[in-house]
Amino acid sequence: MSVIHVQAPGLFTTVQDLGREGYGPMGVSLSGAADPVSLRVGNRLVGNDEGAAALEMTLLGGSFLFPQGAVVALTGSDFGATLDGTIIECWKPVEISPGQTLSLGPTRSGARCYLCVRGGIRVKPFLGSASTHILSGLGGLDGRSLRKGDVLNIGPVSGSFHHAAITAQTLKCLAPRKILRVTPGPQSDWFPESSQRTFYASTYRVSEESNRMGLRLEGDPISTSSGVGEMTTEGVSLGAIQIPEGGQPIMLFVEQQTTGGYPKIANVISADLASIGQLRPRDEIRFEKVSWEMARSLLREMEELISG
């Protein structure tokens, strides 16, 4: 079996696939790739199923030795990758010869880069997924981020490899957004018109305290209507934007708690969830309200681009 030797893990590198759906009632959130679009495209480029497990690197990439060689694709943000010192491009399949080392540095654009390998990363699944759930220490490689000296197994491959490609126009259309489109949240009517105008007109900065559980935003505070009491804890969805005491929004993400007791003013649409995964601390974002029909249309457009 082919393997990858981790010579340097990077800042925060984990094994991720498309996550584990259906376990919210058990208190287990989706987890999975923070930027699932990049993961899916990367897997298609190397001939894998879209949901095959890959490495997700955050802000600073690692260094990886391939003793038996491999076919890989780097997608997501540009981490300045080199193969034995030679610069290689993202969003293209690359053949690595036995004994070569792939090295990545600090990000030059967004937050996360994906290393997709033909055959996928082979780890023991937990609840049907290879994804690492850091908060609970489950899945991935021993439920943790990678360390120097780790050895990762690559899954078996069959048949010959045919180089795939993605057009520049498709990449442009799939590029992360800083204006996130949202639909109204279940408690949107708790917020007076003045608060909603503030929310949609303001620019928010991503806090240093953000992580895969949620992104804390800093900006003009949002208040609910006077006289509104505490709400009963209820299930929360990926991309929900909660307004806690103090009025600074929290955008729930892939390792979110499965229930919450703060009112939700809006929810990021499915087509823009991958953009959240590319936000770095201190990035600035805004929100744009769209209709339910538009949200569905944008998701269809995205799916057509990925599958096209």
Image (tube, helix red, strand yellow):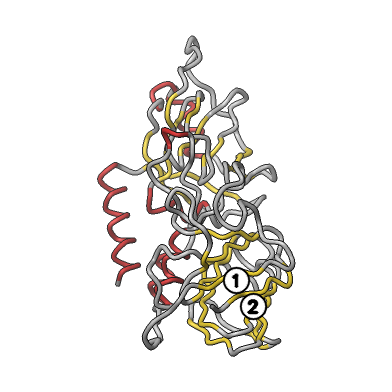
Q: Residue at x 63, y 38 (%)?
A: 218
Count up the numbered dots: 2
211 relative position to 236: left or right: right
Residue 81: give its label.
2
54 relative position to 67: left or right: left
Could you tell me which quadrant the C terminus lies in? bottom left
Please give the residue where the numbered disc 1 appears in the rendered image: 78
Q: Secondary structure at mark 1?
A: loop
Label 2 vs label 1, nearer the camera: 2
Instruction: Give the Cα separation between the discs numbered 2 and 1.
Output: 8 Å
Q: Residue at x 52, y 44 (%)?
A: 253
Q: Residue at x 30, y 42 (%)?
A: 291
Under mark 2, the amino acid is Ala
Residue 22 position, x and y percent, is 38, 42
Residue 43 position, x and y percent, is 43, 71
**Viewer-nearest residue: 84 or 181:** 84
Residue 200 position, x and y percent, is 47, 38
**Mark 2 vs 1: CB contact within 8 A:** yes
**Viewer-nearest residue: 130 or 54:** 130
Q: Residue at x 47, y 77 (%)?
A: 118
Residue 246 placement: quadrant: top right
Residue 49 position, x and y percent, is 37, 69
Under mark 1, the amino acid is Asp
Label 2 packing within 10 angstroms: few (<14), some (14-19), many (20+): many
Label 1 packing within 10 angstroms: few (<14), some (14-19), many (20+): many
Residue 156 placement: quadrant: bottom left
**Viewer-nearest residue: 236 or 301:** 236
